[in-house]
Image: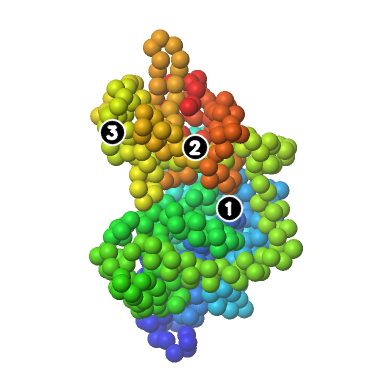
Amino acid sequence: MADQLSPDEKFDLITRNLQEVLGEEKLKQVLQERELRVYWGTATTGKPHVAYFVPMSKIADFLKAGCEVTILFADLHAYLDNMKAPWELLELRVKYYEQVIKAMLESIGVPLEKLKFVKGTDYQLSREYTLDVYRLSSMVTEHDAKKAGAEVVKQVEHPLLSGLLYPGLQALDEEYLKVDAQFGGVDQRKIFTLAEKYLPSLGYAKRAHLMNPMVPGLTGTKMSSSEEESKIDLLDSKEDVKKKLKKAFCEPGNIQNNGVLSFVKYVLFPLRGEFYIKRDPKWGGDKVYTEFEEVEKDFAEELIHPGDLKASVEVVLNQLLEPIRKKFELPELRKLTNSAYPDPSKTSHRKGCQEDDELAPSRLDIRVGKIISVEKHPDADSLYLEKIDVGEAEPRTVVSGLVAYVSQEELQDRMVLLLCNLKPQKMRGIESQAMLLCASIEGEPRRVEPLDPPEGSSPGERVFVEGYETGKADDRLNPKKKVWEKLQVDLKISDECVAQWKDKQLMTKLGQITCKTLKGGNIS
């Protein structure tokens, strides 16, 4: 196919569905002379999920346009990013990523023989590369390094030097992989501009950069490996896919932050060229769409029901996942999966010791929420009803006495934390569907403050305990087992006003959970 395309047609195929391209003229110039060399890198941290089909579908485009494509398994980057991949698991995770990425590519019909696969540590530990790291570190300021990694490297209160090195290494990869362009998500834009600024200072050419949009997860926020509820794992069963899609944020007529609709746009249409909606004849019957804009328009006008959209996506998604599931039924790949991603509720990667299942904080479904209304309980003067958006189709109703400590006006539109998998309880006749988590200090008077998620947080983002990022929350905590009560004992506020469990920080992907003033307080 590539032999039959003009340079302009190749450029259009390479850049379709991208959010931004830096260096368009350079791309066009290269395409006039020869095939483009491009690389995509992935840090081997959490398990790849279905959002990885977005870059995979673009890699398919690159190959159709005749590009020479390199896939980098960035194992050293995975370690530098606040040790998201412990050193002892690096090799295992690279092997897992290689197997699962190849299975994904085979699932969408991409011929593997046209791709080059490279492991970061195969060249990043060489004398030449190491010297270039030192040369680069003598030019890049701390401010520029921190700014470049702000949306990619895990942000913590006391950042490690390794996280500051991360963006520079990614810039050097462009030279050592001998490519014309780097492909990645738009969240890497600041790393790309750092590369454009500093590589010429080392005597290396400035490369072009191709950026995919960030696809919303099932909760309406960025799909993330560390947020169990925001993603569908590549090895999830059909039942799990159905269950997660059923809970996905997909408001009727709402085309913003709609992860289900985005999957249709960025994965299904590029791969298949059409989308089939199956529905009851009384709602218009089955329909085949050949343009995404038609799907988006019909959904916005509520001619497509969210249930029909989810059901139709479920069918195609399972078709993509089935060959991957089948491949990973092999005993050696099952063993690899369990070794690369040991259950954090049973094994601490810091101490290597067994943890009591009852005390795994990953069992708590804690999410960021936004209070959208506050009103008095009709039958209790001291209680109020808060409607809180947690990224689901409908807001949750929470019954609390928080207004005794924080004014109704202050609570309106405030971002808070909710424990979402307790059994709902009726309070004076109205069911409270979650618990609003607060810091408190007993005394006269008692002091209470809601916990604060990091700035820029969105409803539905998962809150996790450091070191337990990949654990799965219970669907519903069994009240007879007293799981919440046992875990709650070790939830405290530090002297720096940071929320902690057994001295490990409570976090979202954007940073730590805090409160304003209650140092040493309890969390409940």
| Residue at 41 percent of width and 33 percent of height | 426
Toward the viewer: 394 or 224?
A: 394
Residue 73 versus residue 515 in the image, above or below: below
| Residue at 58 percent of width and 70 percent of height | 322
Toward the viewer: 290 or 29?
A: 290
Residue identifier under label 2: 422
| Residue at 74 percent of width and 63 percent of height | 331
Residue identifier under label 3: 374
The Cα atoms of the two marked residues, 1 and 2, are separated by 27 Å
Residue 191 screen position, x and y as percent: 45, 54
Circle 1 SS class: loop
Q: Reading the chain from its start, which is encountered first: label 1 or label 2?
A: 1
Image marks 2 and 3: residues in contact by CB distance under 8 Å? no
Mark 3 crowd level (few <14, some 14–19, many ≥20, 10 Å Cα): many
Amino acid on which the number 3 mark rests in the picture: Val
- Find residue 46 and name its label: 1
| Residue at 40 percent of width and 22 percent of height | 448
Residue 420 versus residue 124 in the image, above or below: above
Residue 396 screen position, x and y as percent: 37, 41
Is residue 479 something that shows in the picture?
yes
- Find residue 473 and name its label: none
Question: Colour scheme used in the picture?
Answer: rainbow
The quarter of the displayed image where residue 456 is located: top left
Circle 3 SS class: strand
Toward the viewer: 478 or 259?
A: 478
Residue 204 versus residue 134 in the image, above or below: below
Amino acid on which the number 2 mark rests in the picture: Leu
Residue 283 screen position, x and y as percent: 31, 70
Report the mark closest to the observer, 3 or 1.
3
Q: Reading the chain from its start, which is encountered first: label 2 or label 3?
A: 3
Circle 2 SS class: loop
